Amino acid sequence: MAEEPWNDEPHDDGDAGFAPPEEDFGGADGGFDEPADGAGAGRAYDGGDEPADRPYRGGDRGGRARRGNGRGYVPGATGTPVRDALFDRVPPHDDDAEMAVLGGMLMSKDAIGEVSQMIEVTDFYQPKHQTIYEAIINLFSASQPVDAVLVANELLKSGELEKVGGTDYLHSLVASVPTAANATYYAEIVHQRAILRNVIAAGTKIAQLGYSAEGSQAEDVVNLAQAEVYEMSVGKVRQDYAAIGPVVHDALDQLDKLQQGLVNKGVPTGFRDIDDLTQGLQPGQMVVVAGRPAMGKSTLGIDFARAAALHHHMTTIVFSLEMSKVELAQRIISAETNIPLGALRRADEITPERWNTLNGFWSKLDDAPLFIDDSPNMSLMEIRAKCRRLKQTNDLKLVVIDYLQLMTSGKQVESRQQEVSEFSRALKLLAKELEVPVVALSQLNRGPEMRNDKKPQLSDLRESGSIEQDADVVFLVHRPDFYDKEDRPGEADIIMAKHRNGPTETFHLAFLGATSKFKDMPQDYNSGGQGV
């Protein structure tokens, strides 16, 4: 198939339909059949009143393949639309704004820096504008001067100069704008048009999911649709492989900013030694807190949530599949006010002094970004949907789930072990997708009770070895006085049995059961329980 020439005429977002170069579609329903080679061959228009020879504006031009990656809409991308009407209009874009952005960047280095923070290469609709933008960014990133002549040389080296219209077109971009001062204004227009194209792409993909889902679980399809909408709404760019050089550069840059205190270290746990070692719970991590029943794993999970939401104002949600909202709230109140949990359940033990304390704590909660959900029989799909919504509306920073074995998939599975494995993997993927730490509480099997020292091990994780595999960090909660009241009473070992990005350690904390919380030991404490 002959290569289609560039369409250089600026055009608006009108209702004009379009038709790709002639291809035979077949099919009695007037649907689309994609070319088998997927190499950007055009589509034929098989519906409506538009002429079959109308130029196709978009798709694979001049050998430059365009692939959707979150923001950029690909007019020729694979995907069967629900109806021909979805494709009978030119996708939203503004050629004049794209030209003004590039013209401003060719005139001003400051404009390049500002624009590059606002838009991605795929925000440009015209493939030749993508090519020019990439050349500008490449020169700018290499600390080279940028103007029409130098960009022309860069494109000449890559063999793309003539494909974008030659040096005359580059000079026309500069001539199209009187000043570079408005480059960011035009960049915002370009970005907004890209978002609209992204909406179209997401809607088309969701429709395709629905039509092709026969035999699949409806819940799985809904989750994929939700993920598609979330990715579109946050403007997330789905990338493929990356060269090691830029990745290492980013890692060193992050380290430099960390040393200068320019970035947050992570979500604080509230415990001195744990935070010193981990630099806080990191975005994208799956953190497992495991223990035998009544050992304090829920208490530790709530402690993490309190530290993040109440003491550092980080949006946190606790999914409580075991305790009700009221029970959870009572534990938080007790831990924050030091009023014994038992007293909060007996009206005759709430003295006027305690009422004053409670009223003071209430005012502290007014704007605390802590959310609690105790919905019964909560499915994994519900948890994902609620987390995505909170990420969009409240900048979610931490998720706590109490506890893993009480989750339900809502579908038939071969075994409980397989189901828990699916939960584990899905929570890890959720942490990566939302870029937040997900703390999953988990039961241990009876392994510790079979040992003389009663200490838990990674192998004791109940019902699934994949929990150990998926987790980035595993904390095992052990209280010696649970088995022997004379063995270090009021103390707890938080055993970091796995730490993907660092060393493991055992942390010694005080367990204050009456007020439902763990607390740092004095700094001069040692594992023997004596000061040094």
Image (cartoon, helix red, strand yellow):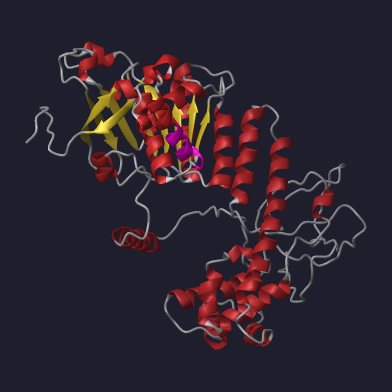
Position of residue 266 measured from the top left corner of the image (x, y, whole percent): 37, 47
- 58 to the left or right of 401: right
Based on the picture, tell me whether residue 360 belongs to the magenta stretch: yes
Check the image and report above or below for 298 versus 364: above
Based on the picture, tell me whether residue 267 belongs to the magenta stretch: no
Position of residue 343 measured from the top left corner of the image (x, y, whole percent): 38, 18
Position of residue 284 measured from the top left corner of the image (x, y, whole percent): 43, 44
- 86 to the left or right of 349: right
Seen at 57% across and 73% down, the residue is 133
In the rendered image, the quadrant that contains the N terminus is bottom right
- In the rendered structure, which segment of residues is drawn in magenta? 359-367
Residue 108 position by quadrant? bottom right
Position of residue 185 measured from the top left corner of the image (x, y, whole percent): 64, 72
The residue closer to the viewer here, 341 or 487, is 341
Check the image and report above or below for 38 versus 375: below
Seen at 35% across and 59% down, the residue is 254
Label count reads 0
Check the image and report above or below for 430 versus 54: above
The residue closer to the viewer here, 84 or 122, is 122
Seen at 23% across and 37% down, the residue is 504
- 495 to the left or right of 523: right
In the rendered image, the quadrant that contains the C terminus is top left
Check the image and report above or below for 259 versus 156: above
